[in-house]
Amino acid sequence: MVPHELHPDNWVDNYADYLFNYAVGRVSDAEIAKDLVQETFFAGLNSAKNYKGDAAERTWLIAILKRKVIDYYRKINSKKGKAEVRMSYGGNNDSEGDWLEEQVADPFSTLENDTIENEELGNAIQDCIGKLPKKQALVFKMKTIQGIGTEDICKELGINPSNLWVMIHRARTALMGCLNQNWFNL
């Protein structure tokens, strides 16, 4: 596999809209999403020397943005809401399905990970995913957790891209409601 390269001069043109849509889907506030994307680009520039080329540029930036979203919720939620989300879904590769945050150092993070809270939050997320309709849960796992491309998911499940994004949006909304009720408010 040929290592990927970073091209920071093209980030805004190539990834700003995608990162914004990703962020606004998680924080439900356009201004906060814009700030998170800006912080992501800034952190990417600051940690570019640590980029190993193992992941595509967009994947690497999404990993940074995920960290920024987690840090945002750490600041606004209770102690239990401050845990970093990290879940493993098994497979042939030990790291397959793990969140990518661990691959990107965040120089601005001041909180340490709490293994027990991580495990509890991971279990809460799994429980909430289990409450979704089967097809919605499958689409959510394939796209968000496994990172399978839209076209591949649509072909495999016989759905169109609009249907896929509606299911993902509904899954995210249901998961956030479930987590707010069962985790963040404990």
Image (spheres, rainbow, N blue to C red):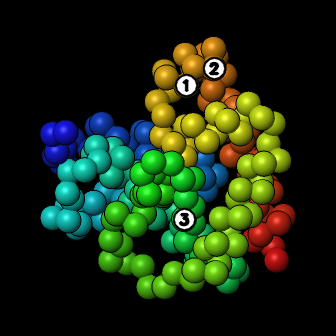
Q: Amino acid at mark 2?
A: Leu
For the residue pair 31 and 72, the one nearer the viewer reads as 72
Q: Left or right? Give the position of 93 relative to 58.
A: right
The residue where tag 3 is placed is 86
Task: Tell me which numbered mark, 1 or 3, is placed earlier along the sequence.
Answer: 3
Residue beneath the point at 57% across and 37% down? 142
* Residue 101 screen position, x and y as percent: 42, 63
Q: Is residue 77 visible?
A: no
Q: Left or right? Give the position of 132 relative to 93.
A: right
From this view, report whether residue 100 is shown above or below residue 11: below
| Tag 2 near tag 1, CB within 8 Å | yes
From this view, report whether residue 3 is shown above or below residue 64: above
* Residue 9 screen position, x and y as percent: 17, 46
**Residue extending furthest front?**
92
Q: Is residue 137 visible?
A: yes
The residue where tag 1 is placed is 153
Q: Left or right? Give the position of 93 relative to 143.
A: left
* Residue 162 screen position, x and y as percent: 62, 21
Q: Secondary structure at mark 2?
A: helix
Q: Which mark is residue 157?
A: 2
Q: Secondary structure at mark 1?
A: helix
Residue beneath the point at 61% across and 56% down? 27
Kindly indicate the quadrant of the structure image that contains residue 183: bottom right
